Image (cartoon, grey):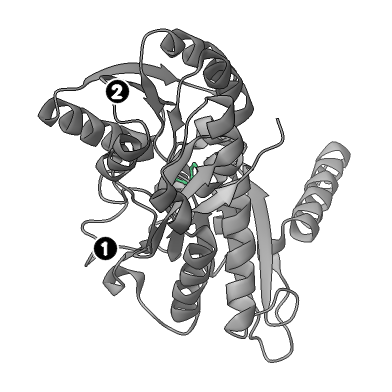
Amino acid sequence: MKKGMKKLVAVFMIMALTVAVFSACGGETDEEGTTVKIGIIQLMEHPSLNTIRESIIEGLAEDGYTDGENITIDYQNGQNDMSVMKSIVQKFVANECDVIIAIATPAAQAALSETEEIPIIFAAVTDPVDAGLVDSLEAPGANVTGTSDEVSAEMIMDLAKQITPEFKTIGALYSSGEDNSASVIAGLKEYAAENDLEVVESAVTNTSEVKQAAQYLADKVDVVYSPIDNTVASAMASATDVFNSAGVPFYVSADSMVQDGGLATYGIDYTVLGKETAHMVTEVIEGGNPAAMPVKKMSDMSIYVNTDTAKALNIEIPADILESATVFTSAE
Ligand code: TRP
């Protein structure tokens, strides 16, 4: 071997070692060879996705699988970027992860695009069929299944009718790049057509566009609605600033979005969803086949209201709603 070549080989070996040390899906096998390697890919960091991840890890521990004991968890943040997510999953594949947990729709899509063999359990995918992840909810069919947080636009609009009955126009604020939002917005349009309401759309491609998209809607519509959209969820402060000062009720689709200043929603409990996801991961670790494990939808729903936002908008929340709601106040 030539000297230059030797150097190159040495450099590669060091690189390979570094990868082995720093990317944990390569968790070492213990004496009995029972350590299960789990890669977690999360679309981005926002409060709801963080809650889901923490609950999954807790749920796994409840099932007897603890990081550093009998499982190794390699958590990676996808930074809301498809190419970042694809390379994360490529590393999981190269490191021979036993299971991949994908949190949110685009993360699950990235995972499925990189492996048809490693079981993928997704968390909080709004519409797994529409996102091209499963054949059907009952029989997913391939190496992927998980939990869904679907909530229809209609249910939230029904709540909106009880809180602010007079609206005629609905602004739709969402990200055009998220399949999880696309199918819900289609449902919103159907609802509007049936109820003689008008929808004005304002779609964004990233978080930095949310403020402007909100401003576009603020003087055109009576209320604004956002689906379970990751991009909007991570820019709630800019959106609520605009809507609260313009006096526009902002209906959202997840508890965290109400906590972050949205007026109200009818939504699921993401702590429960995280635990359910963990149980599905456990089932796969213990030999379950994702192709035959139905997608789990969450059935327990509740109303969430932000009373500080209501105050800022001069809206009185009906007493019967307040009674059954989880109330957030946000210091703004
Ligand atoms: N359902 C979203 C998806 O399919 C992910 C998600 C979970 C989410 N919790 C949320 C998005 C809260 C916005 C707000 O990608």
Q: Residue 34: which numbered mark, if any? A: none
Tag 1's secondary structure?
Answer: loop
Residue 204 seen in this snapshot? yes
Residue drawn 52% across the image and 26% down it:
314
- In the image, residue 40 sits, relative to residue 172, either above or below, namely below
Q: Is mark 2 within 8 Å of ligand 1?
A: no
Q: Give the number of callouts.
A: 2
Please state which of residues 88 and 162 is positioned toward the viewer in this rendering: 162
Label 1: how many Cα within 10 Å (few below 14, some 14–19, many 20+): many
Please state which of residues 127 and 269 is positioned toward the viewer in this rendering: 269
Reading the image, the residue beneath label 1 is 140
Between marks 2 and 1, how big is the CA–CA gap?
40 Å
Label 2: how many Cα within 10 Å (few below 14, some 14–19, many 20+): some
The residue under label 1 is which amino acid type?
A: Pro
Task: Locate residue 30, reporting x and y percent.
Answer: 73, 84
- N-terminal of the pair, mark 2 or mark 1, is 1
User: Quarter of the image containing the C terminus?
Assistant: top right
Q: Residue 167: which numbered mark, if any? A: 2
- In the image, residue 35 sits, relative to residue 128, either above or below, namely below
Residue drawn 66% across the image and 38% down it:
330
The residue under label 2 is which amino acid type?
A: Phe
The quadrant in which residue 237 appears is top right
Q: Which residue lies furthest to the bottom in this view?
A: 32
Report the side of 80 relative to 158 (left or right). right
Report the side of 311 relative to 196 (left or right). right
The quadrant in which residue 265 appears is top left
Residue 109 seen in this snapshot? no
Of circles 2 and 1, the one toward us is: 2
Please state which of residues 197 and 4 is positioned toward the viewer in this rendering: 197
Task: Locate residue 165, reporting x and y percent.
Answer: 30, 30
Residue drawn 51% across the image and 30% down it:
232
